[in-house]
Image: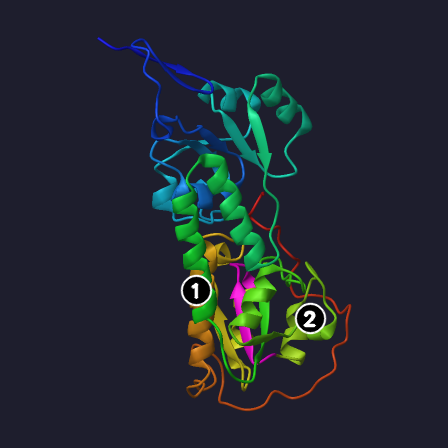
């Protein structure tokens, strides 16, 4: 009887047979990066992804469907938890605790870092990076193709609508971010960028009411973002946007673009009357100068995402 004995670089056989490349063992992975979780869950082979980050099993911070996340173990990111799973590779973000990284590498675990992305092209490069790392080039290219098709499908040929992407804590995205790139692709012009607000700037409700955009995209559960006054603004459409569509790239890009394109198409139909869901009667918003630094109605809340 032939007994196969695993080795780090391949397989050796008690019968002296030389394995073919198809018999090569794929490395096992533990992900401590919630954005990598979403990509790896789609491209990794069955049994290859040993655990994901605990962020992906929380509705407030997950970029993947919770029922999908529930299929995997999760860790809190400690070296002890990870080493107990004996992975070949750990995928983390650049902010991994130096002592954790040192402990993993000292134990012979390869640590790969995955940072934030600013463009769809950056995101597709990350997908290919992880696909090469896991030995699943075909699955990686399938995901890249989905992103490319979604990007093509979301293109809007017409005058852009001014939109305020208002996130948890009352903050706005800056230029040079993936969120702003997707907004522009779907036919929106950034209301906050036109007013000189950069990444993470705080925008209070008073200023939104004084100088509203054509569309308010509320991506958060904070009370300020859901204030009834937003629905009373004339000529303004109010829409909710799932915050999980904005945390990461990868497989969330097609979902985010689909939702943004849906909202952009809705602007081609008449706006609802004041007090109804979506905004007030169609009209051009008055041009009102902002007065920065005015007190806010509510203090900004911390983002629920920890990574």
Q: Nearer the viewer, residue 231 or 163?
A: 163
Looking at the image, tell me whether mark 1 or mark 2 is earlier in sequence order: 1
Q: Nearer the viewer, residue 132 or 283?
A: 132
The relative height of residue 34 versus residue 27 in the rendered view (above or below) is: below
> Can you tell which quarter of the image residue 78 is in?
top right
Residue at the (50%, 23%) spot, across then down: 81
Return the residue at label 1: 150
Q: Is residue 273 left or right of residue 108?
A: left
The relative height of residue 92 versus residue 178 in the rendered view (above or below) is: above
- Find residue 73 and report its horizontal and vertical position in percent: 40, 31
In front: mark 1 or mark 2? 1
Residue at the (39%, 41%) spot, across then down: 69
> Can you tell which quarter of the image residue 214 is in?
bottom right
Residue at the (68%, 87%) spot, across then down: 287
- Find residue 27 and report its horizontal and vertical position in percent: 45, 28
Q: Residue 116, can we see it?
A: yes
> Can you tell which quarter of the image residue 38 is in?
top left
Q: Is residue 191 left or right of residue 148?
A: right
Q: Residue 58, can we see it?
A: no
Mark 2, secondary structure of its residue: helix
The relative height of residue 219 versus residue 55 in the rendered view (above or below) is: below
Magenta stretch: give its range.
213-224
Q: Residues within 10 Å of mark 2 (few under 14, many from 20)?
A: some
Q: Which mark is residue 193?
A: 2
């Amino acid at each position: 009887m032939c007994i196969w004995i695993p080795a780090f670089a391949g397989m050796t056989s008690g019968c002296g047979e030389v394995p073919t490349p198809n018999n090569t063992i794929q490395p096992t992975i533990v992900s401590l990066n919630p954005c990598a979780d979403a990509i790896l869950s789609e491209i990794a082979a069955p049994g290859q992804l040993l655990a994901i980050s605990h962020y992906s099993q929380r509705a407030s911070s997950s970029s993947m469907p919770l029922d999908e996340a529930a299929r995997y173990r999760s860790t809190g990111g400690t070296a002890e938890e990870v080493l107990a799973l004996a992975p070949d590779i750990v995928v983390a973000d650049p902010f991994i605790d130096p002592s954790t990284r040192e402990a993993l590498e000292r134990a012979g675990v390869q640590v790969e870092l995955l940072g934030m992305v600013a463009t769809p092209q950056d995101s597709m490069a990350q997908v290919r990076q992880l696909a090469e790392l896991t030995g699943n080039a075909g699955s990686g290219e399938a995901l890249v193709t989905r992103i490319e098709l979604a990007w093509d499908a979301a293109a809007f040929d017409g005058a852009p609508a001014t939109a305020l992407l208002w996130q948890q804590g009352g903050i706005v995205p800056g230029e040079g971010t993936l969120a702003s790139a997707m907004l522009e692709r779907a036919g929106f012009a950034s209301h906050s960028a036109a007013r000189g607000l950069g990444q993470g700037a705080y925008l209070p409700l008073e200023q939104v009411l004084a100088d509203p955009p054509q569309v308010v995209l509320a991506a958060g559960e904070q009370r300020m973002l859901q204030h009834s006054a937003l629905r009373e603004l004339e000529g303004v459409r109010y829409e909710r946007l799932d915050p999980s569509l904005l945390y990461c790239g990868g497989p969330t890009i097609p979902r985010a673009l689909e939702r943004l394109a849906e909202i952009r198409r809705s602007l081609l139909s008449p706006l609802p009357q004041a007090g109804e869901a979506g905004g007030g009667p169609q009209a051009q918003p008055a041009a009102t100068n902002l007065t920065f630094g005015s007190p806010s109605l509510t203090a900004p809340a911390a983002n629920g995402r920890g990574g």
